Amino acid sequence: MKNNRERLAWFILLFSFFLCVVLAVGTPLGVQYFLRTASASQKASLEPQEGTPRMRRRGQGEAIALIGPTWDVPAGTVISTDTAAEGLLTLYTPGPESEAVAWVKIYDQTEVVLRYARSPRFSVSSLPHRVALEVRLPTHPQADLSPEQTGRAEARVRVSVVPAGGRDTVMEIHTSHFVALLQGGSYEIRVRDGQAELSVIEGTAQITPPDGKAVVVDRSQRAVVRSGSGSVDILPGERNLLRNGDFRLPLEEDWQVYHKDVQQNPPGTVEAITFAGRSVARFHREGMGHAEVGIGQQVNYDVRDFTSLVFRLSVLIQNQSLPGCGQLGSECPILVRIDYKDVYGTDRTWYHGFFSQPPGGTDLLNPWDERIPPQAWYTFDSGNLIDPENPVGPFEVPPALIKGVTIYASGHSFEALVTDVELLAQE
């Protein structure tokens, strides 16, 4: 009996010691693990850019037509566009001082599922911001598409991933053909019935097909995965002929600022700033009389071996004092000029302008002047400027040499923001 009591006492003593050690070691480790891995949902905004995108919050219920921006975009939301709709999904860090971590431009005939978007809850964590999206063709073919058009349908998104708050951002893209991990940079994903592809404009991606090995895709490369194939084909991608088009570096690194035709002081200003967590070039003037301020970049690139040349940028017009683009259609709050030499050696110029205020009754508008929504980001895609059938307006004559690109603001008072400026060439 005495031996039983002694064994029980030793058992209690040893168990207590063991429990004390577990609590002493496990409690700080558990707290440390919690502080490192705890996460919070990111904020998400969705705004229409063309037509009327639709959304089903958490993937449930009837699709809601989106006629204005919304911040109610929880995880699981399905966003879909028809043949005439486009949208912009923006993800922000949680908390009162939010910074953008990713922008997703959703083109027509596309369905995107926001699987999750989370950031570390505590600053001591070394983990990155994480976003996961699924990109696919619309579940139900659009009624206004013919069978031939349905067969050629293509889901397409453009993604910009940026660090925020001193922390990296990682985006996970799911398609029926691969899973891709995207680091900071700019990417484009296209999904068709028979294949999916990922183009890396800036940054690095890791792409993994079903039952295949992970492959790293670098800048100016394009990865294609076809149905039934466990391999990834790496092809030349689009080459960006412009530098510092996202304005993350100081403006003077690659752009030259100029002033022109200032009728009355003050002249306009252009500077690289951070706006809502996004690096942008801000064109601003408060004054009377005409003035022009702009930035230019010399390119001097031979493009005779390229079959595609596409200009893209994102623009937001905060305000403008003149209606339209002025009386002569040349005073837009943002204009783009591409100077090139054609295959016959003649110097030529391509223009495109943006404005938000409706023109006056006698004001002129040039064919290249385009009205966009005020105080909202608008992503412009020129399409292939070498294609004579391009509806935006191609180069008059095929180019041989791109001489330079200029972005400028013209008028009296104006404030406009520009970012993600790209001139993409593909062989």
Image (cartoon, helix red, strand yellow):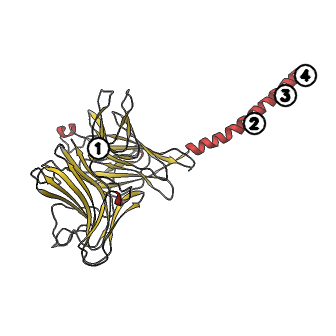
Left or right: residue 304 versus residue 160 is left
Q: Amino acid at mark 1?
A: Arg
Q: Which residue is mark 3?
A: 9
| Residue matched to label 4 | 2
Q: Position of residue 372 (x, y in %)?
A: 26, 61
Instruction: Identify which amino acid the numbered label 3 is placed on.
Output: Ala
Instruction: For mark 3, give the secondary structure.
Output: helix
Q: Is residue 329 above or below residue 115?
A: below
Amino acid type at circle 2 is: Cys
Q: Helix or strand or loop: what does disc 2 sit on?
A: helix
The mark that comes first in sequence, 1 or 3, is: 3
Query: Quick check: 207 above or below 369?
Result: above
Element under label 1? Answer: strand
- Residue named by callout 2: 20
Quick one: quadrant of the N terminus? top right
Q: Quadrant of residue 327?
A: bottom left
Q: Residues within 10 Å of mark 4 (few under 14, many from 20)?
A: few
- State how far apart marks 2 and 1 are (Cα): 57 Å
For marks 2 and 3 on the same chain, the one whose residue lies earlier in the sequence: 3
Left or right, 384 with respect to 136, comes to left
Q: Nearer the viewer, residue 403 or 192?
A: 403
> What is the residue that sits farthest to the left in this orientation?
344
Q: Position of residue 29 (x, y in %)?
A: 64, 40
- What's the distance in space between the residues labelled 4 and 2, CA to CA? 27 Å
How packed mark 2 is, by other alpha carbons closer than 10 Å (few <14, some 14-19, many 20 or more), is few
Seen in the picture, residue 347 relative to 128 is either above or below; the reply is below
Q: Callout 3: 10 Å neighbours few (<14), some, many (20+)? A: few
- Identity of the residue drawn at 67% across and 42% down: 28
- Residue beneath disc 1: 156
**Can residue 312 be seen in the rendering of this structure?**
yes
